[in-house]
Image (cartoon, rainbow, N blue to C red):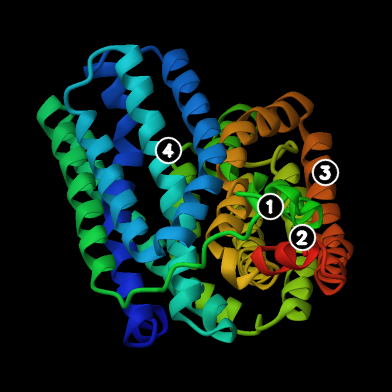
Amino acid sequence: MTLRILPPPGAPRRLAAAQLSNSVGDGAYYVCSALYFTRVVGLSPAQIGLGLTVAWAVGSVAGVPLGALADRRGPRGTSAVLAAATAASVLSFLVIRSFWAFLAAVVVYATAQCGLGAARQALLAGLVPAERRTGVLAHLQSMLNGGLALGAALGGLALGADTERAYLAVFVLDAVGFLGCAALLLTLPAVAPVPLRAAGEPRLAVLRDRPYALVTLLNAVLLLRMPLLSLAVPLWIVQRTHAPGWLVSALFVLNTVAVMLFQVRTARPVTDVDTALRALRVSGLVMAASCAVFALSALPGAAWAAAGLLVAGAVLQVDAEMRQSAGSWQIGFSLAPADRMGQYQGFFGTGVPVARTLGPLVLTSLLLVWGVPGWLLLGALLSAASYGMGPAVRRAEAARGRGEPRGAVAEAVRAG
């Protein structure tokens, strides 16, 4: 099983090591940060929510220019600098004691994280052949989940201690992880920066690529499943079902372990746009089935029956998640021009902060207010978005074939 999780030797394995390095600290950070900011810093939950919403909104906008910077300056060095910037922002949490200082720190954190994601994708694209990228990303996702699980366990120890010193140790661990990530990234071969822009070429060509923007929008809709297990399902279990509360933790562990063990196998058949679209269509159907099963858990009955339905829904959900991830990775890379990979990946990656920002509001409104009909509507929405990817991707491919603006080369031709 270890051999399935680890990518091939060379650049892919170093990328995986860098991913593991920062994900362990992140896992501990995610578990402990809310309690630290409320109990130690003294912020209210409303202030934390507002700060994180603003931070991820800024980060989603900053990802595109930072991705473009990676194209211009080289993704290896840019990735290392952004990893170090993330470490610095985490260390600043040790000394902040006011809302405005917290807001400034989390804005830097979210901006650096979004830029790091775009730059690392560009680095991977420059070091890994196109036909192997989705497979390597599957390995990285497995390592990410393994690191998050380990980090969450360490964070649990800090929660058990419930002291300021324990929480501070978690932030130091996270910062050291990102510094280790930066050091590992610098051991990779350099990827040559793209040539300077031609006269009249837009600085951020991706913002004019409407077909790619549509694909990115649909991907953001599909990523609304991200807050399901971390927010919507826990609240659903407590408020609408008779299942035991400890099932919240069990479902999270189930998801993490499943992705760690099976993401590589699930991504293996996805090798081109056609197989990616097929994976997304199946993902949409499985996700709709998952939502229906989750909805059934609220029906009157024994606690064990509700728990069984919730476990079944979580199994379907993680299967849909792995298929959607593999399909989206392949499409995001396939439609991006090679000379603008950083800015295109930065734009495509905005779906993650958008889902983090809007997902909680959308899901709680749909599921906790509407109940069973909300689950069915959510399943229909995600299924429709997955099927809508087909026409959207074909349109983007056609635009690329017609020579519409898709990067430096196409822009130069049109300008000439």
Label 1 sits on a secondary structure element that is loop
Residue 233 seen in this snapshot: no
Discs 1/3, front: 1
Q: Are marks 1 and 2 in contact (CB under 8 Å)?
A: yes
Q: In the image, what residue type sits under mark 2?
A: Ala
**Residue that numbered label 1 is attached to:** 200
Toward the left, the furthest residue is 165
Label 3 sits on a secondary structure element that is helix
Residue 411 seen in this snapshot: yes
Residue 287 placement (x, y as % from top left) = 73, 57
**Residue that numbered label 3 is attached to:** 376
Q: In the image, what residue type sits under mark 1?
A: Gly
Among the two numbered marks 1 and 3 on one chain, the one whose residue lies closer to the N terminus: 1
Which residue occupies 56% across, 38% down? Answer: 61
- Residue 286 vs 262, above or below: the answer is above
**Residue that numbered label 4 is attached to:** 110
Compare residues 192 and 219 and report the one nearer the observer.
Answer: 192
Label 2 sits on a secondary structure element that is helix
Neighbour tally class for label 1: few under 14, some 14-19, many 20 plus, Cα within 10 Å: few
Q: In the image, what residue type sits under mark 4?
A: Ala
